[in-house]
Image (cartoon, grey):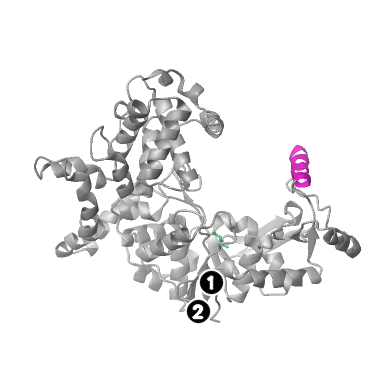
Amino acid sequence: MIVRVRIAPSPTGDPHVGTAYIALFNLIFARHFKGKFILRIEDTDQSRSRPEYEKNIMDALRWCKIDWDEGPDMGGPFGPYRQSERTEIYRKYVYELLDRGHAYKCFATPEELTEMRELAAAQGKRVGYDRRYRNLSPQEVREREEAGQSFVIRLKVPLTGECVFEDQIKGRISAPWADIDDQVLLKSDGFPTYHLANVVDDYLMKITHVIRGDEWMSSTPKHILLYESFGWKTPVFMHMPLLLGKEGKKLSKRKNPTSIFYFRDSGYLPEALVNFLTLMGYSMTGEREIYTLDEIVRDFDPKRIGISGAFFDIQKLGWVNQKKIIESIPEDQLWNRLSDWKFNEAFMRKLMPLVHTRIKTFTDFIQLCDFFFIADMKYTPELLCPKNVSSDVVSCILQGIIWSLDEQEDWSGAGLEKASHEASERFGVHHKKVVMQILFATVMGKHMGPPLFDSATLLGKDILRVRFLTAIETLGGISNKRMDLLKKGWEKKNCRELAGAAGAVQ
Ligand code: GLU
C-alpha cells in the first residue's frame, strides 16, 4: 500500500497556524512512510471562499517549507484538486446514494427548520431536524418536485445503535447514532456540503490516512456511514490534539495571534515555527526539543503523537527561535536572514516615502520607524486612552474597528480610514481627538510618527490585528456581557450609549 495523506483547508480566512500544524504531521507521515502528501482546497462554501485566501494558504505553507506532491497549483493524477471544480462529481455520487436508499430528498423550508430547531432546543434534544421528509413515498417526492419545491439531499442516519471506530491516536471511539442529525449532503443550490465532498474526494484521491484536527472528530461517524453506504473501505482516522490558547480553549483569531504571516512578519524563523508546531503534538525520543524537519521525519513514530491539546505558548516559541538562531544560522549568515525579513530593498523602498520629510538626521530614522521592527508593543492605559476617555470605551472602539475591518475585508490603510470614521460616528466621538489618537497609540505605540494609514498598509493585516488585540488586553479586555451589548450596538450602528461621557469629548 502506498501511503497517501492530505490536508484539505477551506480558503475562508487568513492562513492559520493550525493548518501548518496539521499539514506538518501529514507531511512528516508521508515522508516517513515514503508516501504522497496532497493539498486539496475545500472551497464549497461559495459565500466565504476567496481565491486570495487560497493563495495565502499556499504562500504561507511554502514559507514554512511545507511542500506537497499533488495540488491545485501543480495538478496530479487525481485532480482537479479544488472542490469547486468537481461539483458534477459530487452530484453523481449523491444520486447513487439516493438510488440505493441511503439518502433522501428533504423539502423542509427555512421556516420549518427554525421551528424544528426551536422545539428540539426546548425539549433538550440534540438532533434539530425531526426527519419528517425521510419516509415520503416516491410519488409524493415526484409531486413536490413537479410543483417546483426546492430540496436538499440528506443522509439516512441509523435511528438506533452506535457508531464505533478505532482512531489511531485516540483509540476506540463510540457515538450513539441517535445524537447525529440526518446530515445534508447536497444543498438546494446543488453544491455539496463539506461531508459529502470530503468523503468522495478522499475516496477518489485514494487517501489512506485521514490526519486532521480533533475538531473534526464529531464528523467522523457521518463520514464512516458515507463510506459504508457507498460500499467503500474507510481510511485510517487520526485526530490530532488541538492547539490551545492561554485560556485552554481552541486557538482563535479573536483572542490570539493565529495567522502564519503574523509570525513571519514578527521576525520568527520558519524552521523555528515548524519545530515548535511539531513539539505541540509530538514528543521526540529522549525528550529532544530542538530538531530539524528531516530529523523528525527520520525518527517519526505515530505512537508518540500526544493525545490531549497542547498550549500554544509564545514564550516557548521565542525560546525555540533563539535556539535556532544560535544553532542553525552561522554568524556570517545572520545578516542575510535579517535582510530577507525586513531589512531589504523592497521593504525600505516602501518605507522611504513615509520618512522622507520627517527626519532631521539619519539617526531620527530608527526612532521614527521603530514600530515597524518591534513585535512586542509596550502599551500602557495612559498611552492608549485619550483624555477623559475610559479604558472600557477605548477597548470598545478598538473592537468596533476590528469588526469594521473584517466586514470590509480590507485591512489596508484605506480600510482603516473608513473604519475610523465609522467608529467615530457610531460611538459619537471626535474623529481626530479620540479615534485617531487611539489608532496612533495602537498602531505605532506613540502619538506622533509617519502617516498612520500608510504605516498600517505597510505593517499589514496580521500585525495590525494582534496590535489591536494586545491593546484591548492591556486595557483589561472586554467582558462577555459588554461584548454582547457592543455587538448589538455596532450592528444597529449606534454605540453612543456605551461611549457615555466620551461622546462629549470635542
Ligand atoms: N475543510 C476542512 C478544514 O477546513 C477539512 C477537514 C478535514 O481534514 O477533513 O479543515
Report if residue 463 is visible in the image.
yes
Q: Quadrant of the C terminus?
A: top left
Looking at the magenta stretch, what is its main secondary structure? helix
Amino acid carrying mark 1 in the image: Tyr
Whether residues under marks 2 and 1 lie with C-beta atoms below 8 angstroms apart, the answer is yes
Q: What amino acid is found at the position of numbered circle 2 in the picture?
A: Gly
Determine which of the numbered discs, if any, sits on residue 493 in the image: none
Q: Which residues are magenta?
A: 111-122
- Please provide percent x and percent y for residue 293: 36, 68
Decide if residue 429 is on the left or right side of residue 150: left
- Residue in front for this viewpoint, 321 or 481: 481
Q: Is ligand 1 closer than 8 angstroms to the Cβ of mark 2? A: no
Residue at the spot 16% in from the left edge and 40% down from the top edge: 358
Which residue is tagged 2? 76
156 over 415 or under it: above or below? below
At 10% across and 43% down in the image, what residue appears?
363
Ligand 1, what quadrant?
Answer: bottom right
Q: Secondary structure at mark 1?
A: loop
Q: For residue 202, what is the image quadrant?
A: bottom right
From the viewer's perspective, is residue 449 above or below residue 501?
Answer: below
Residue 173 in the image, given as x and y percentages of width and height = 65, 59
Element at label 2: loop
| Residue behind mark 1 | 81
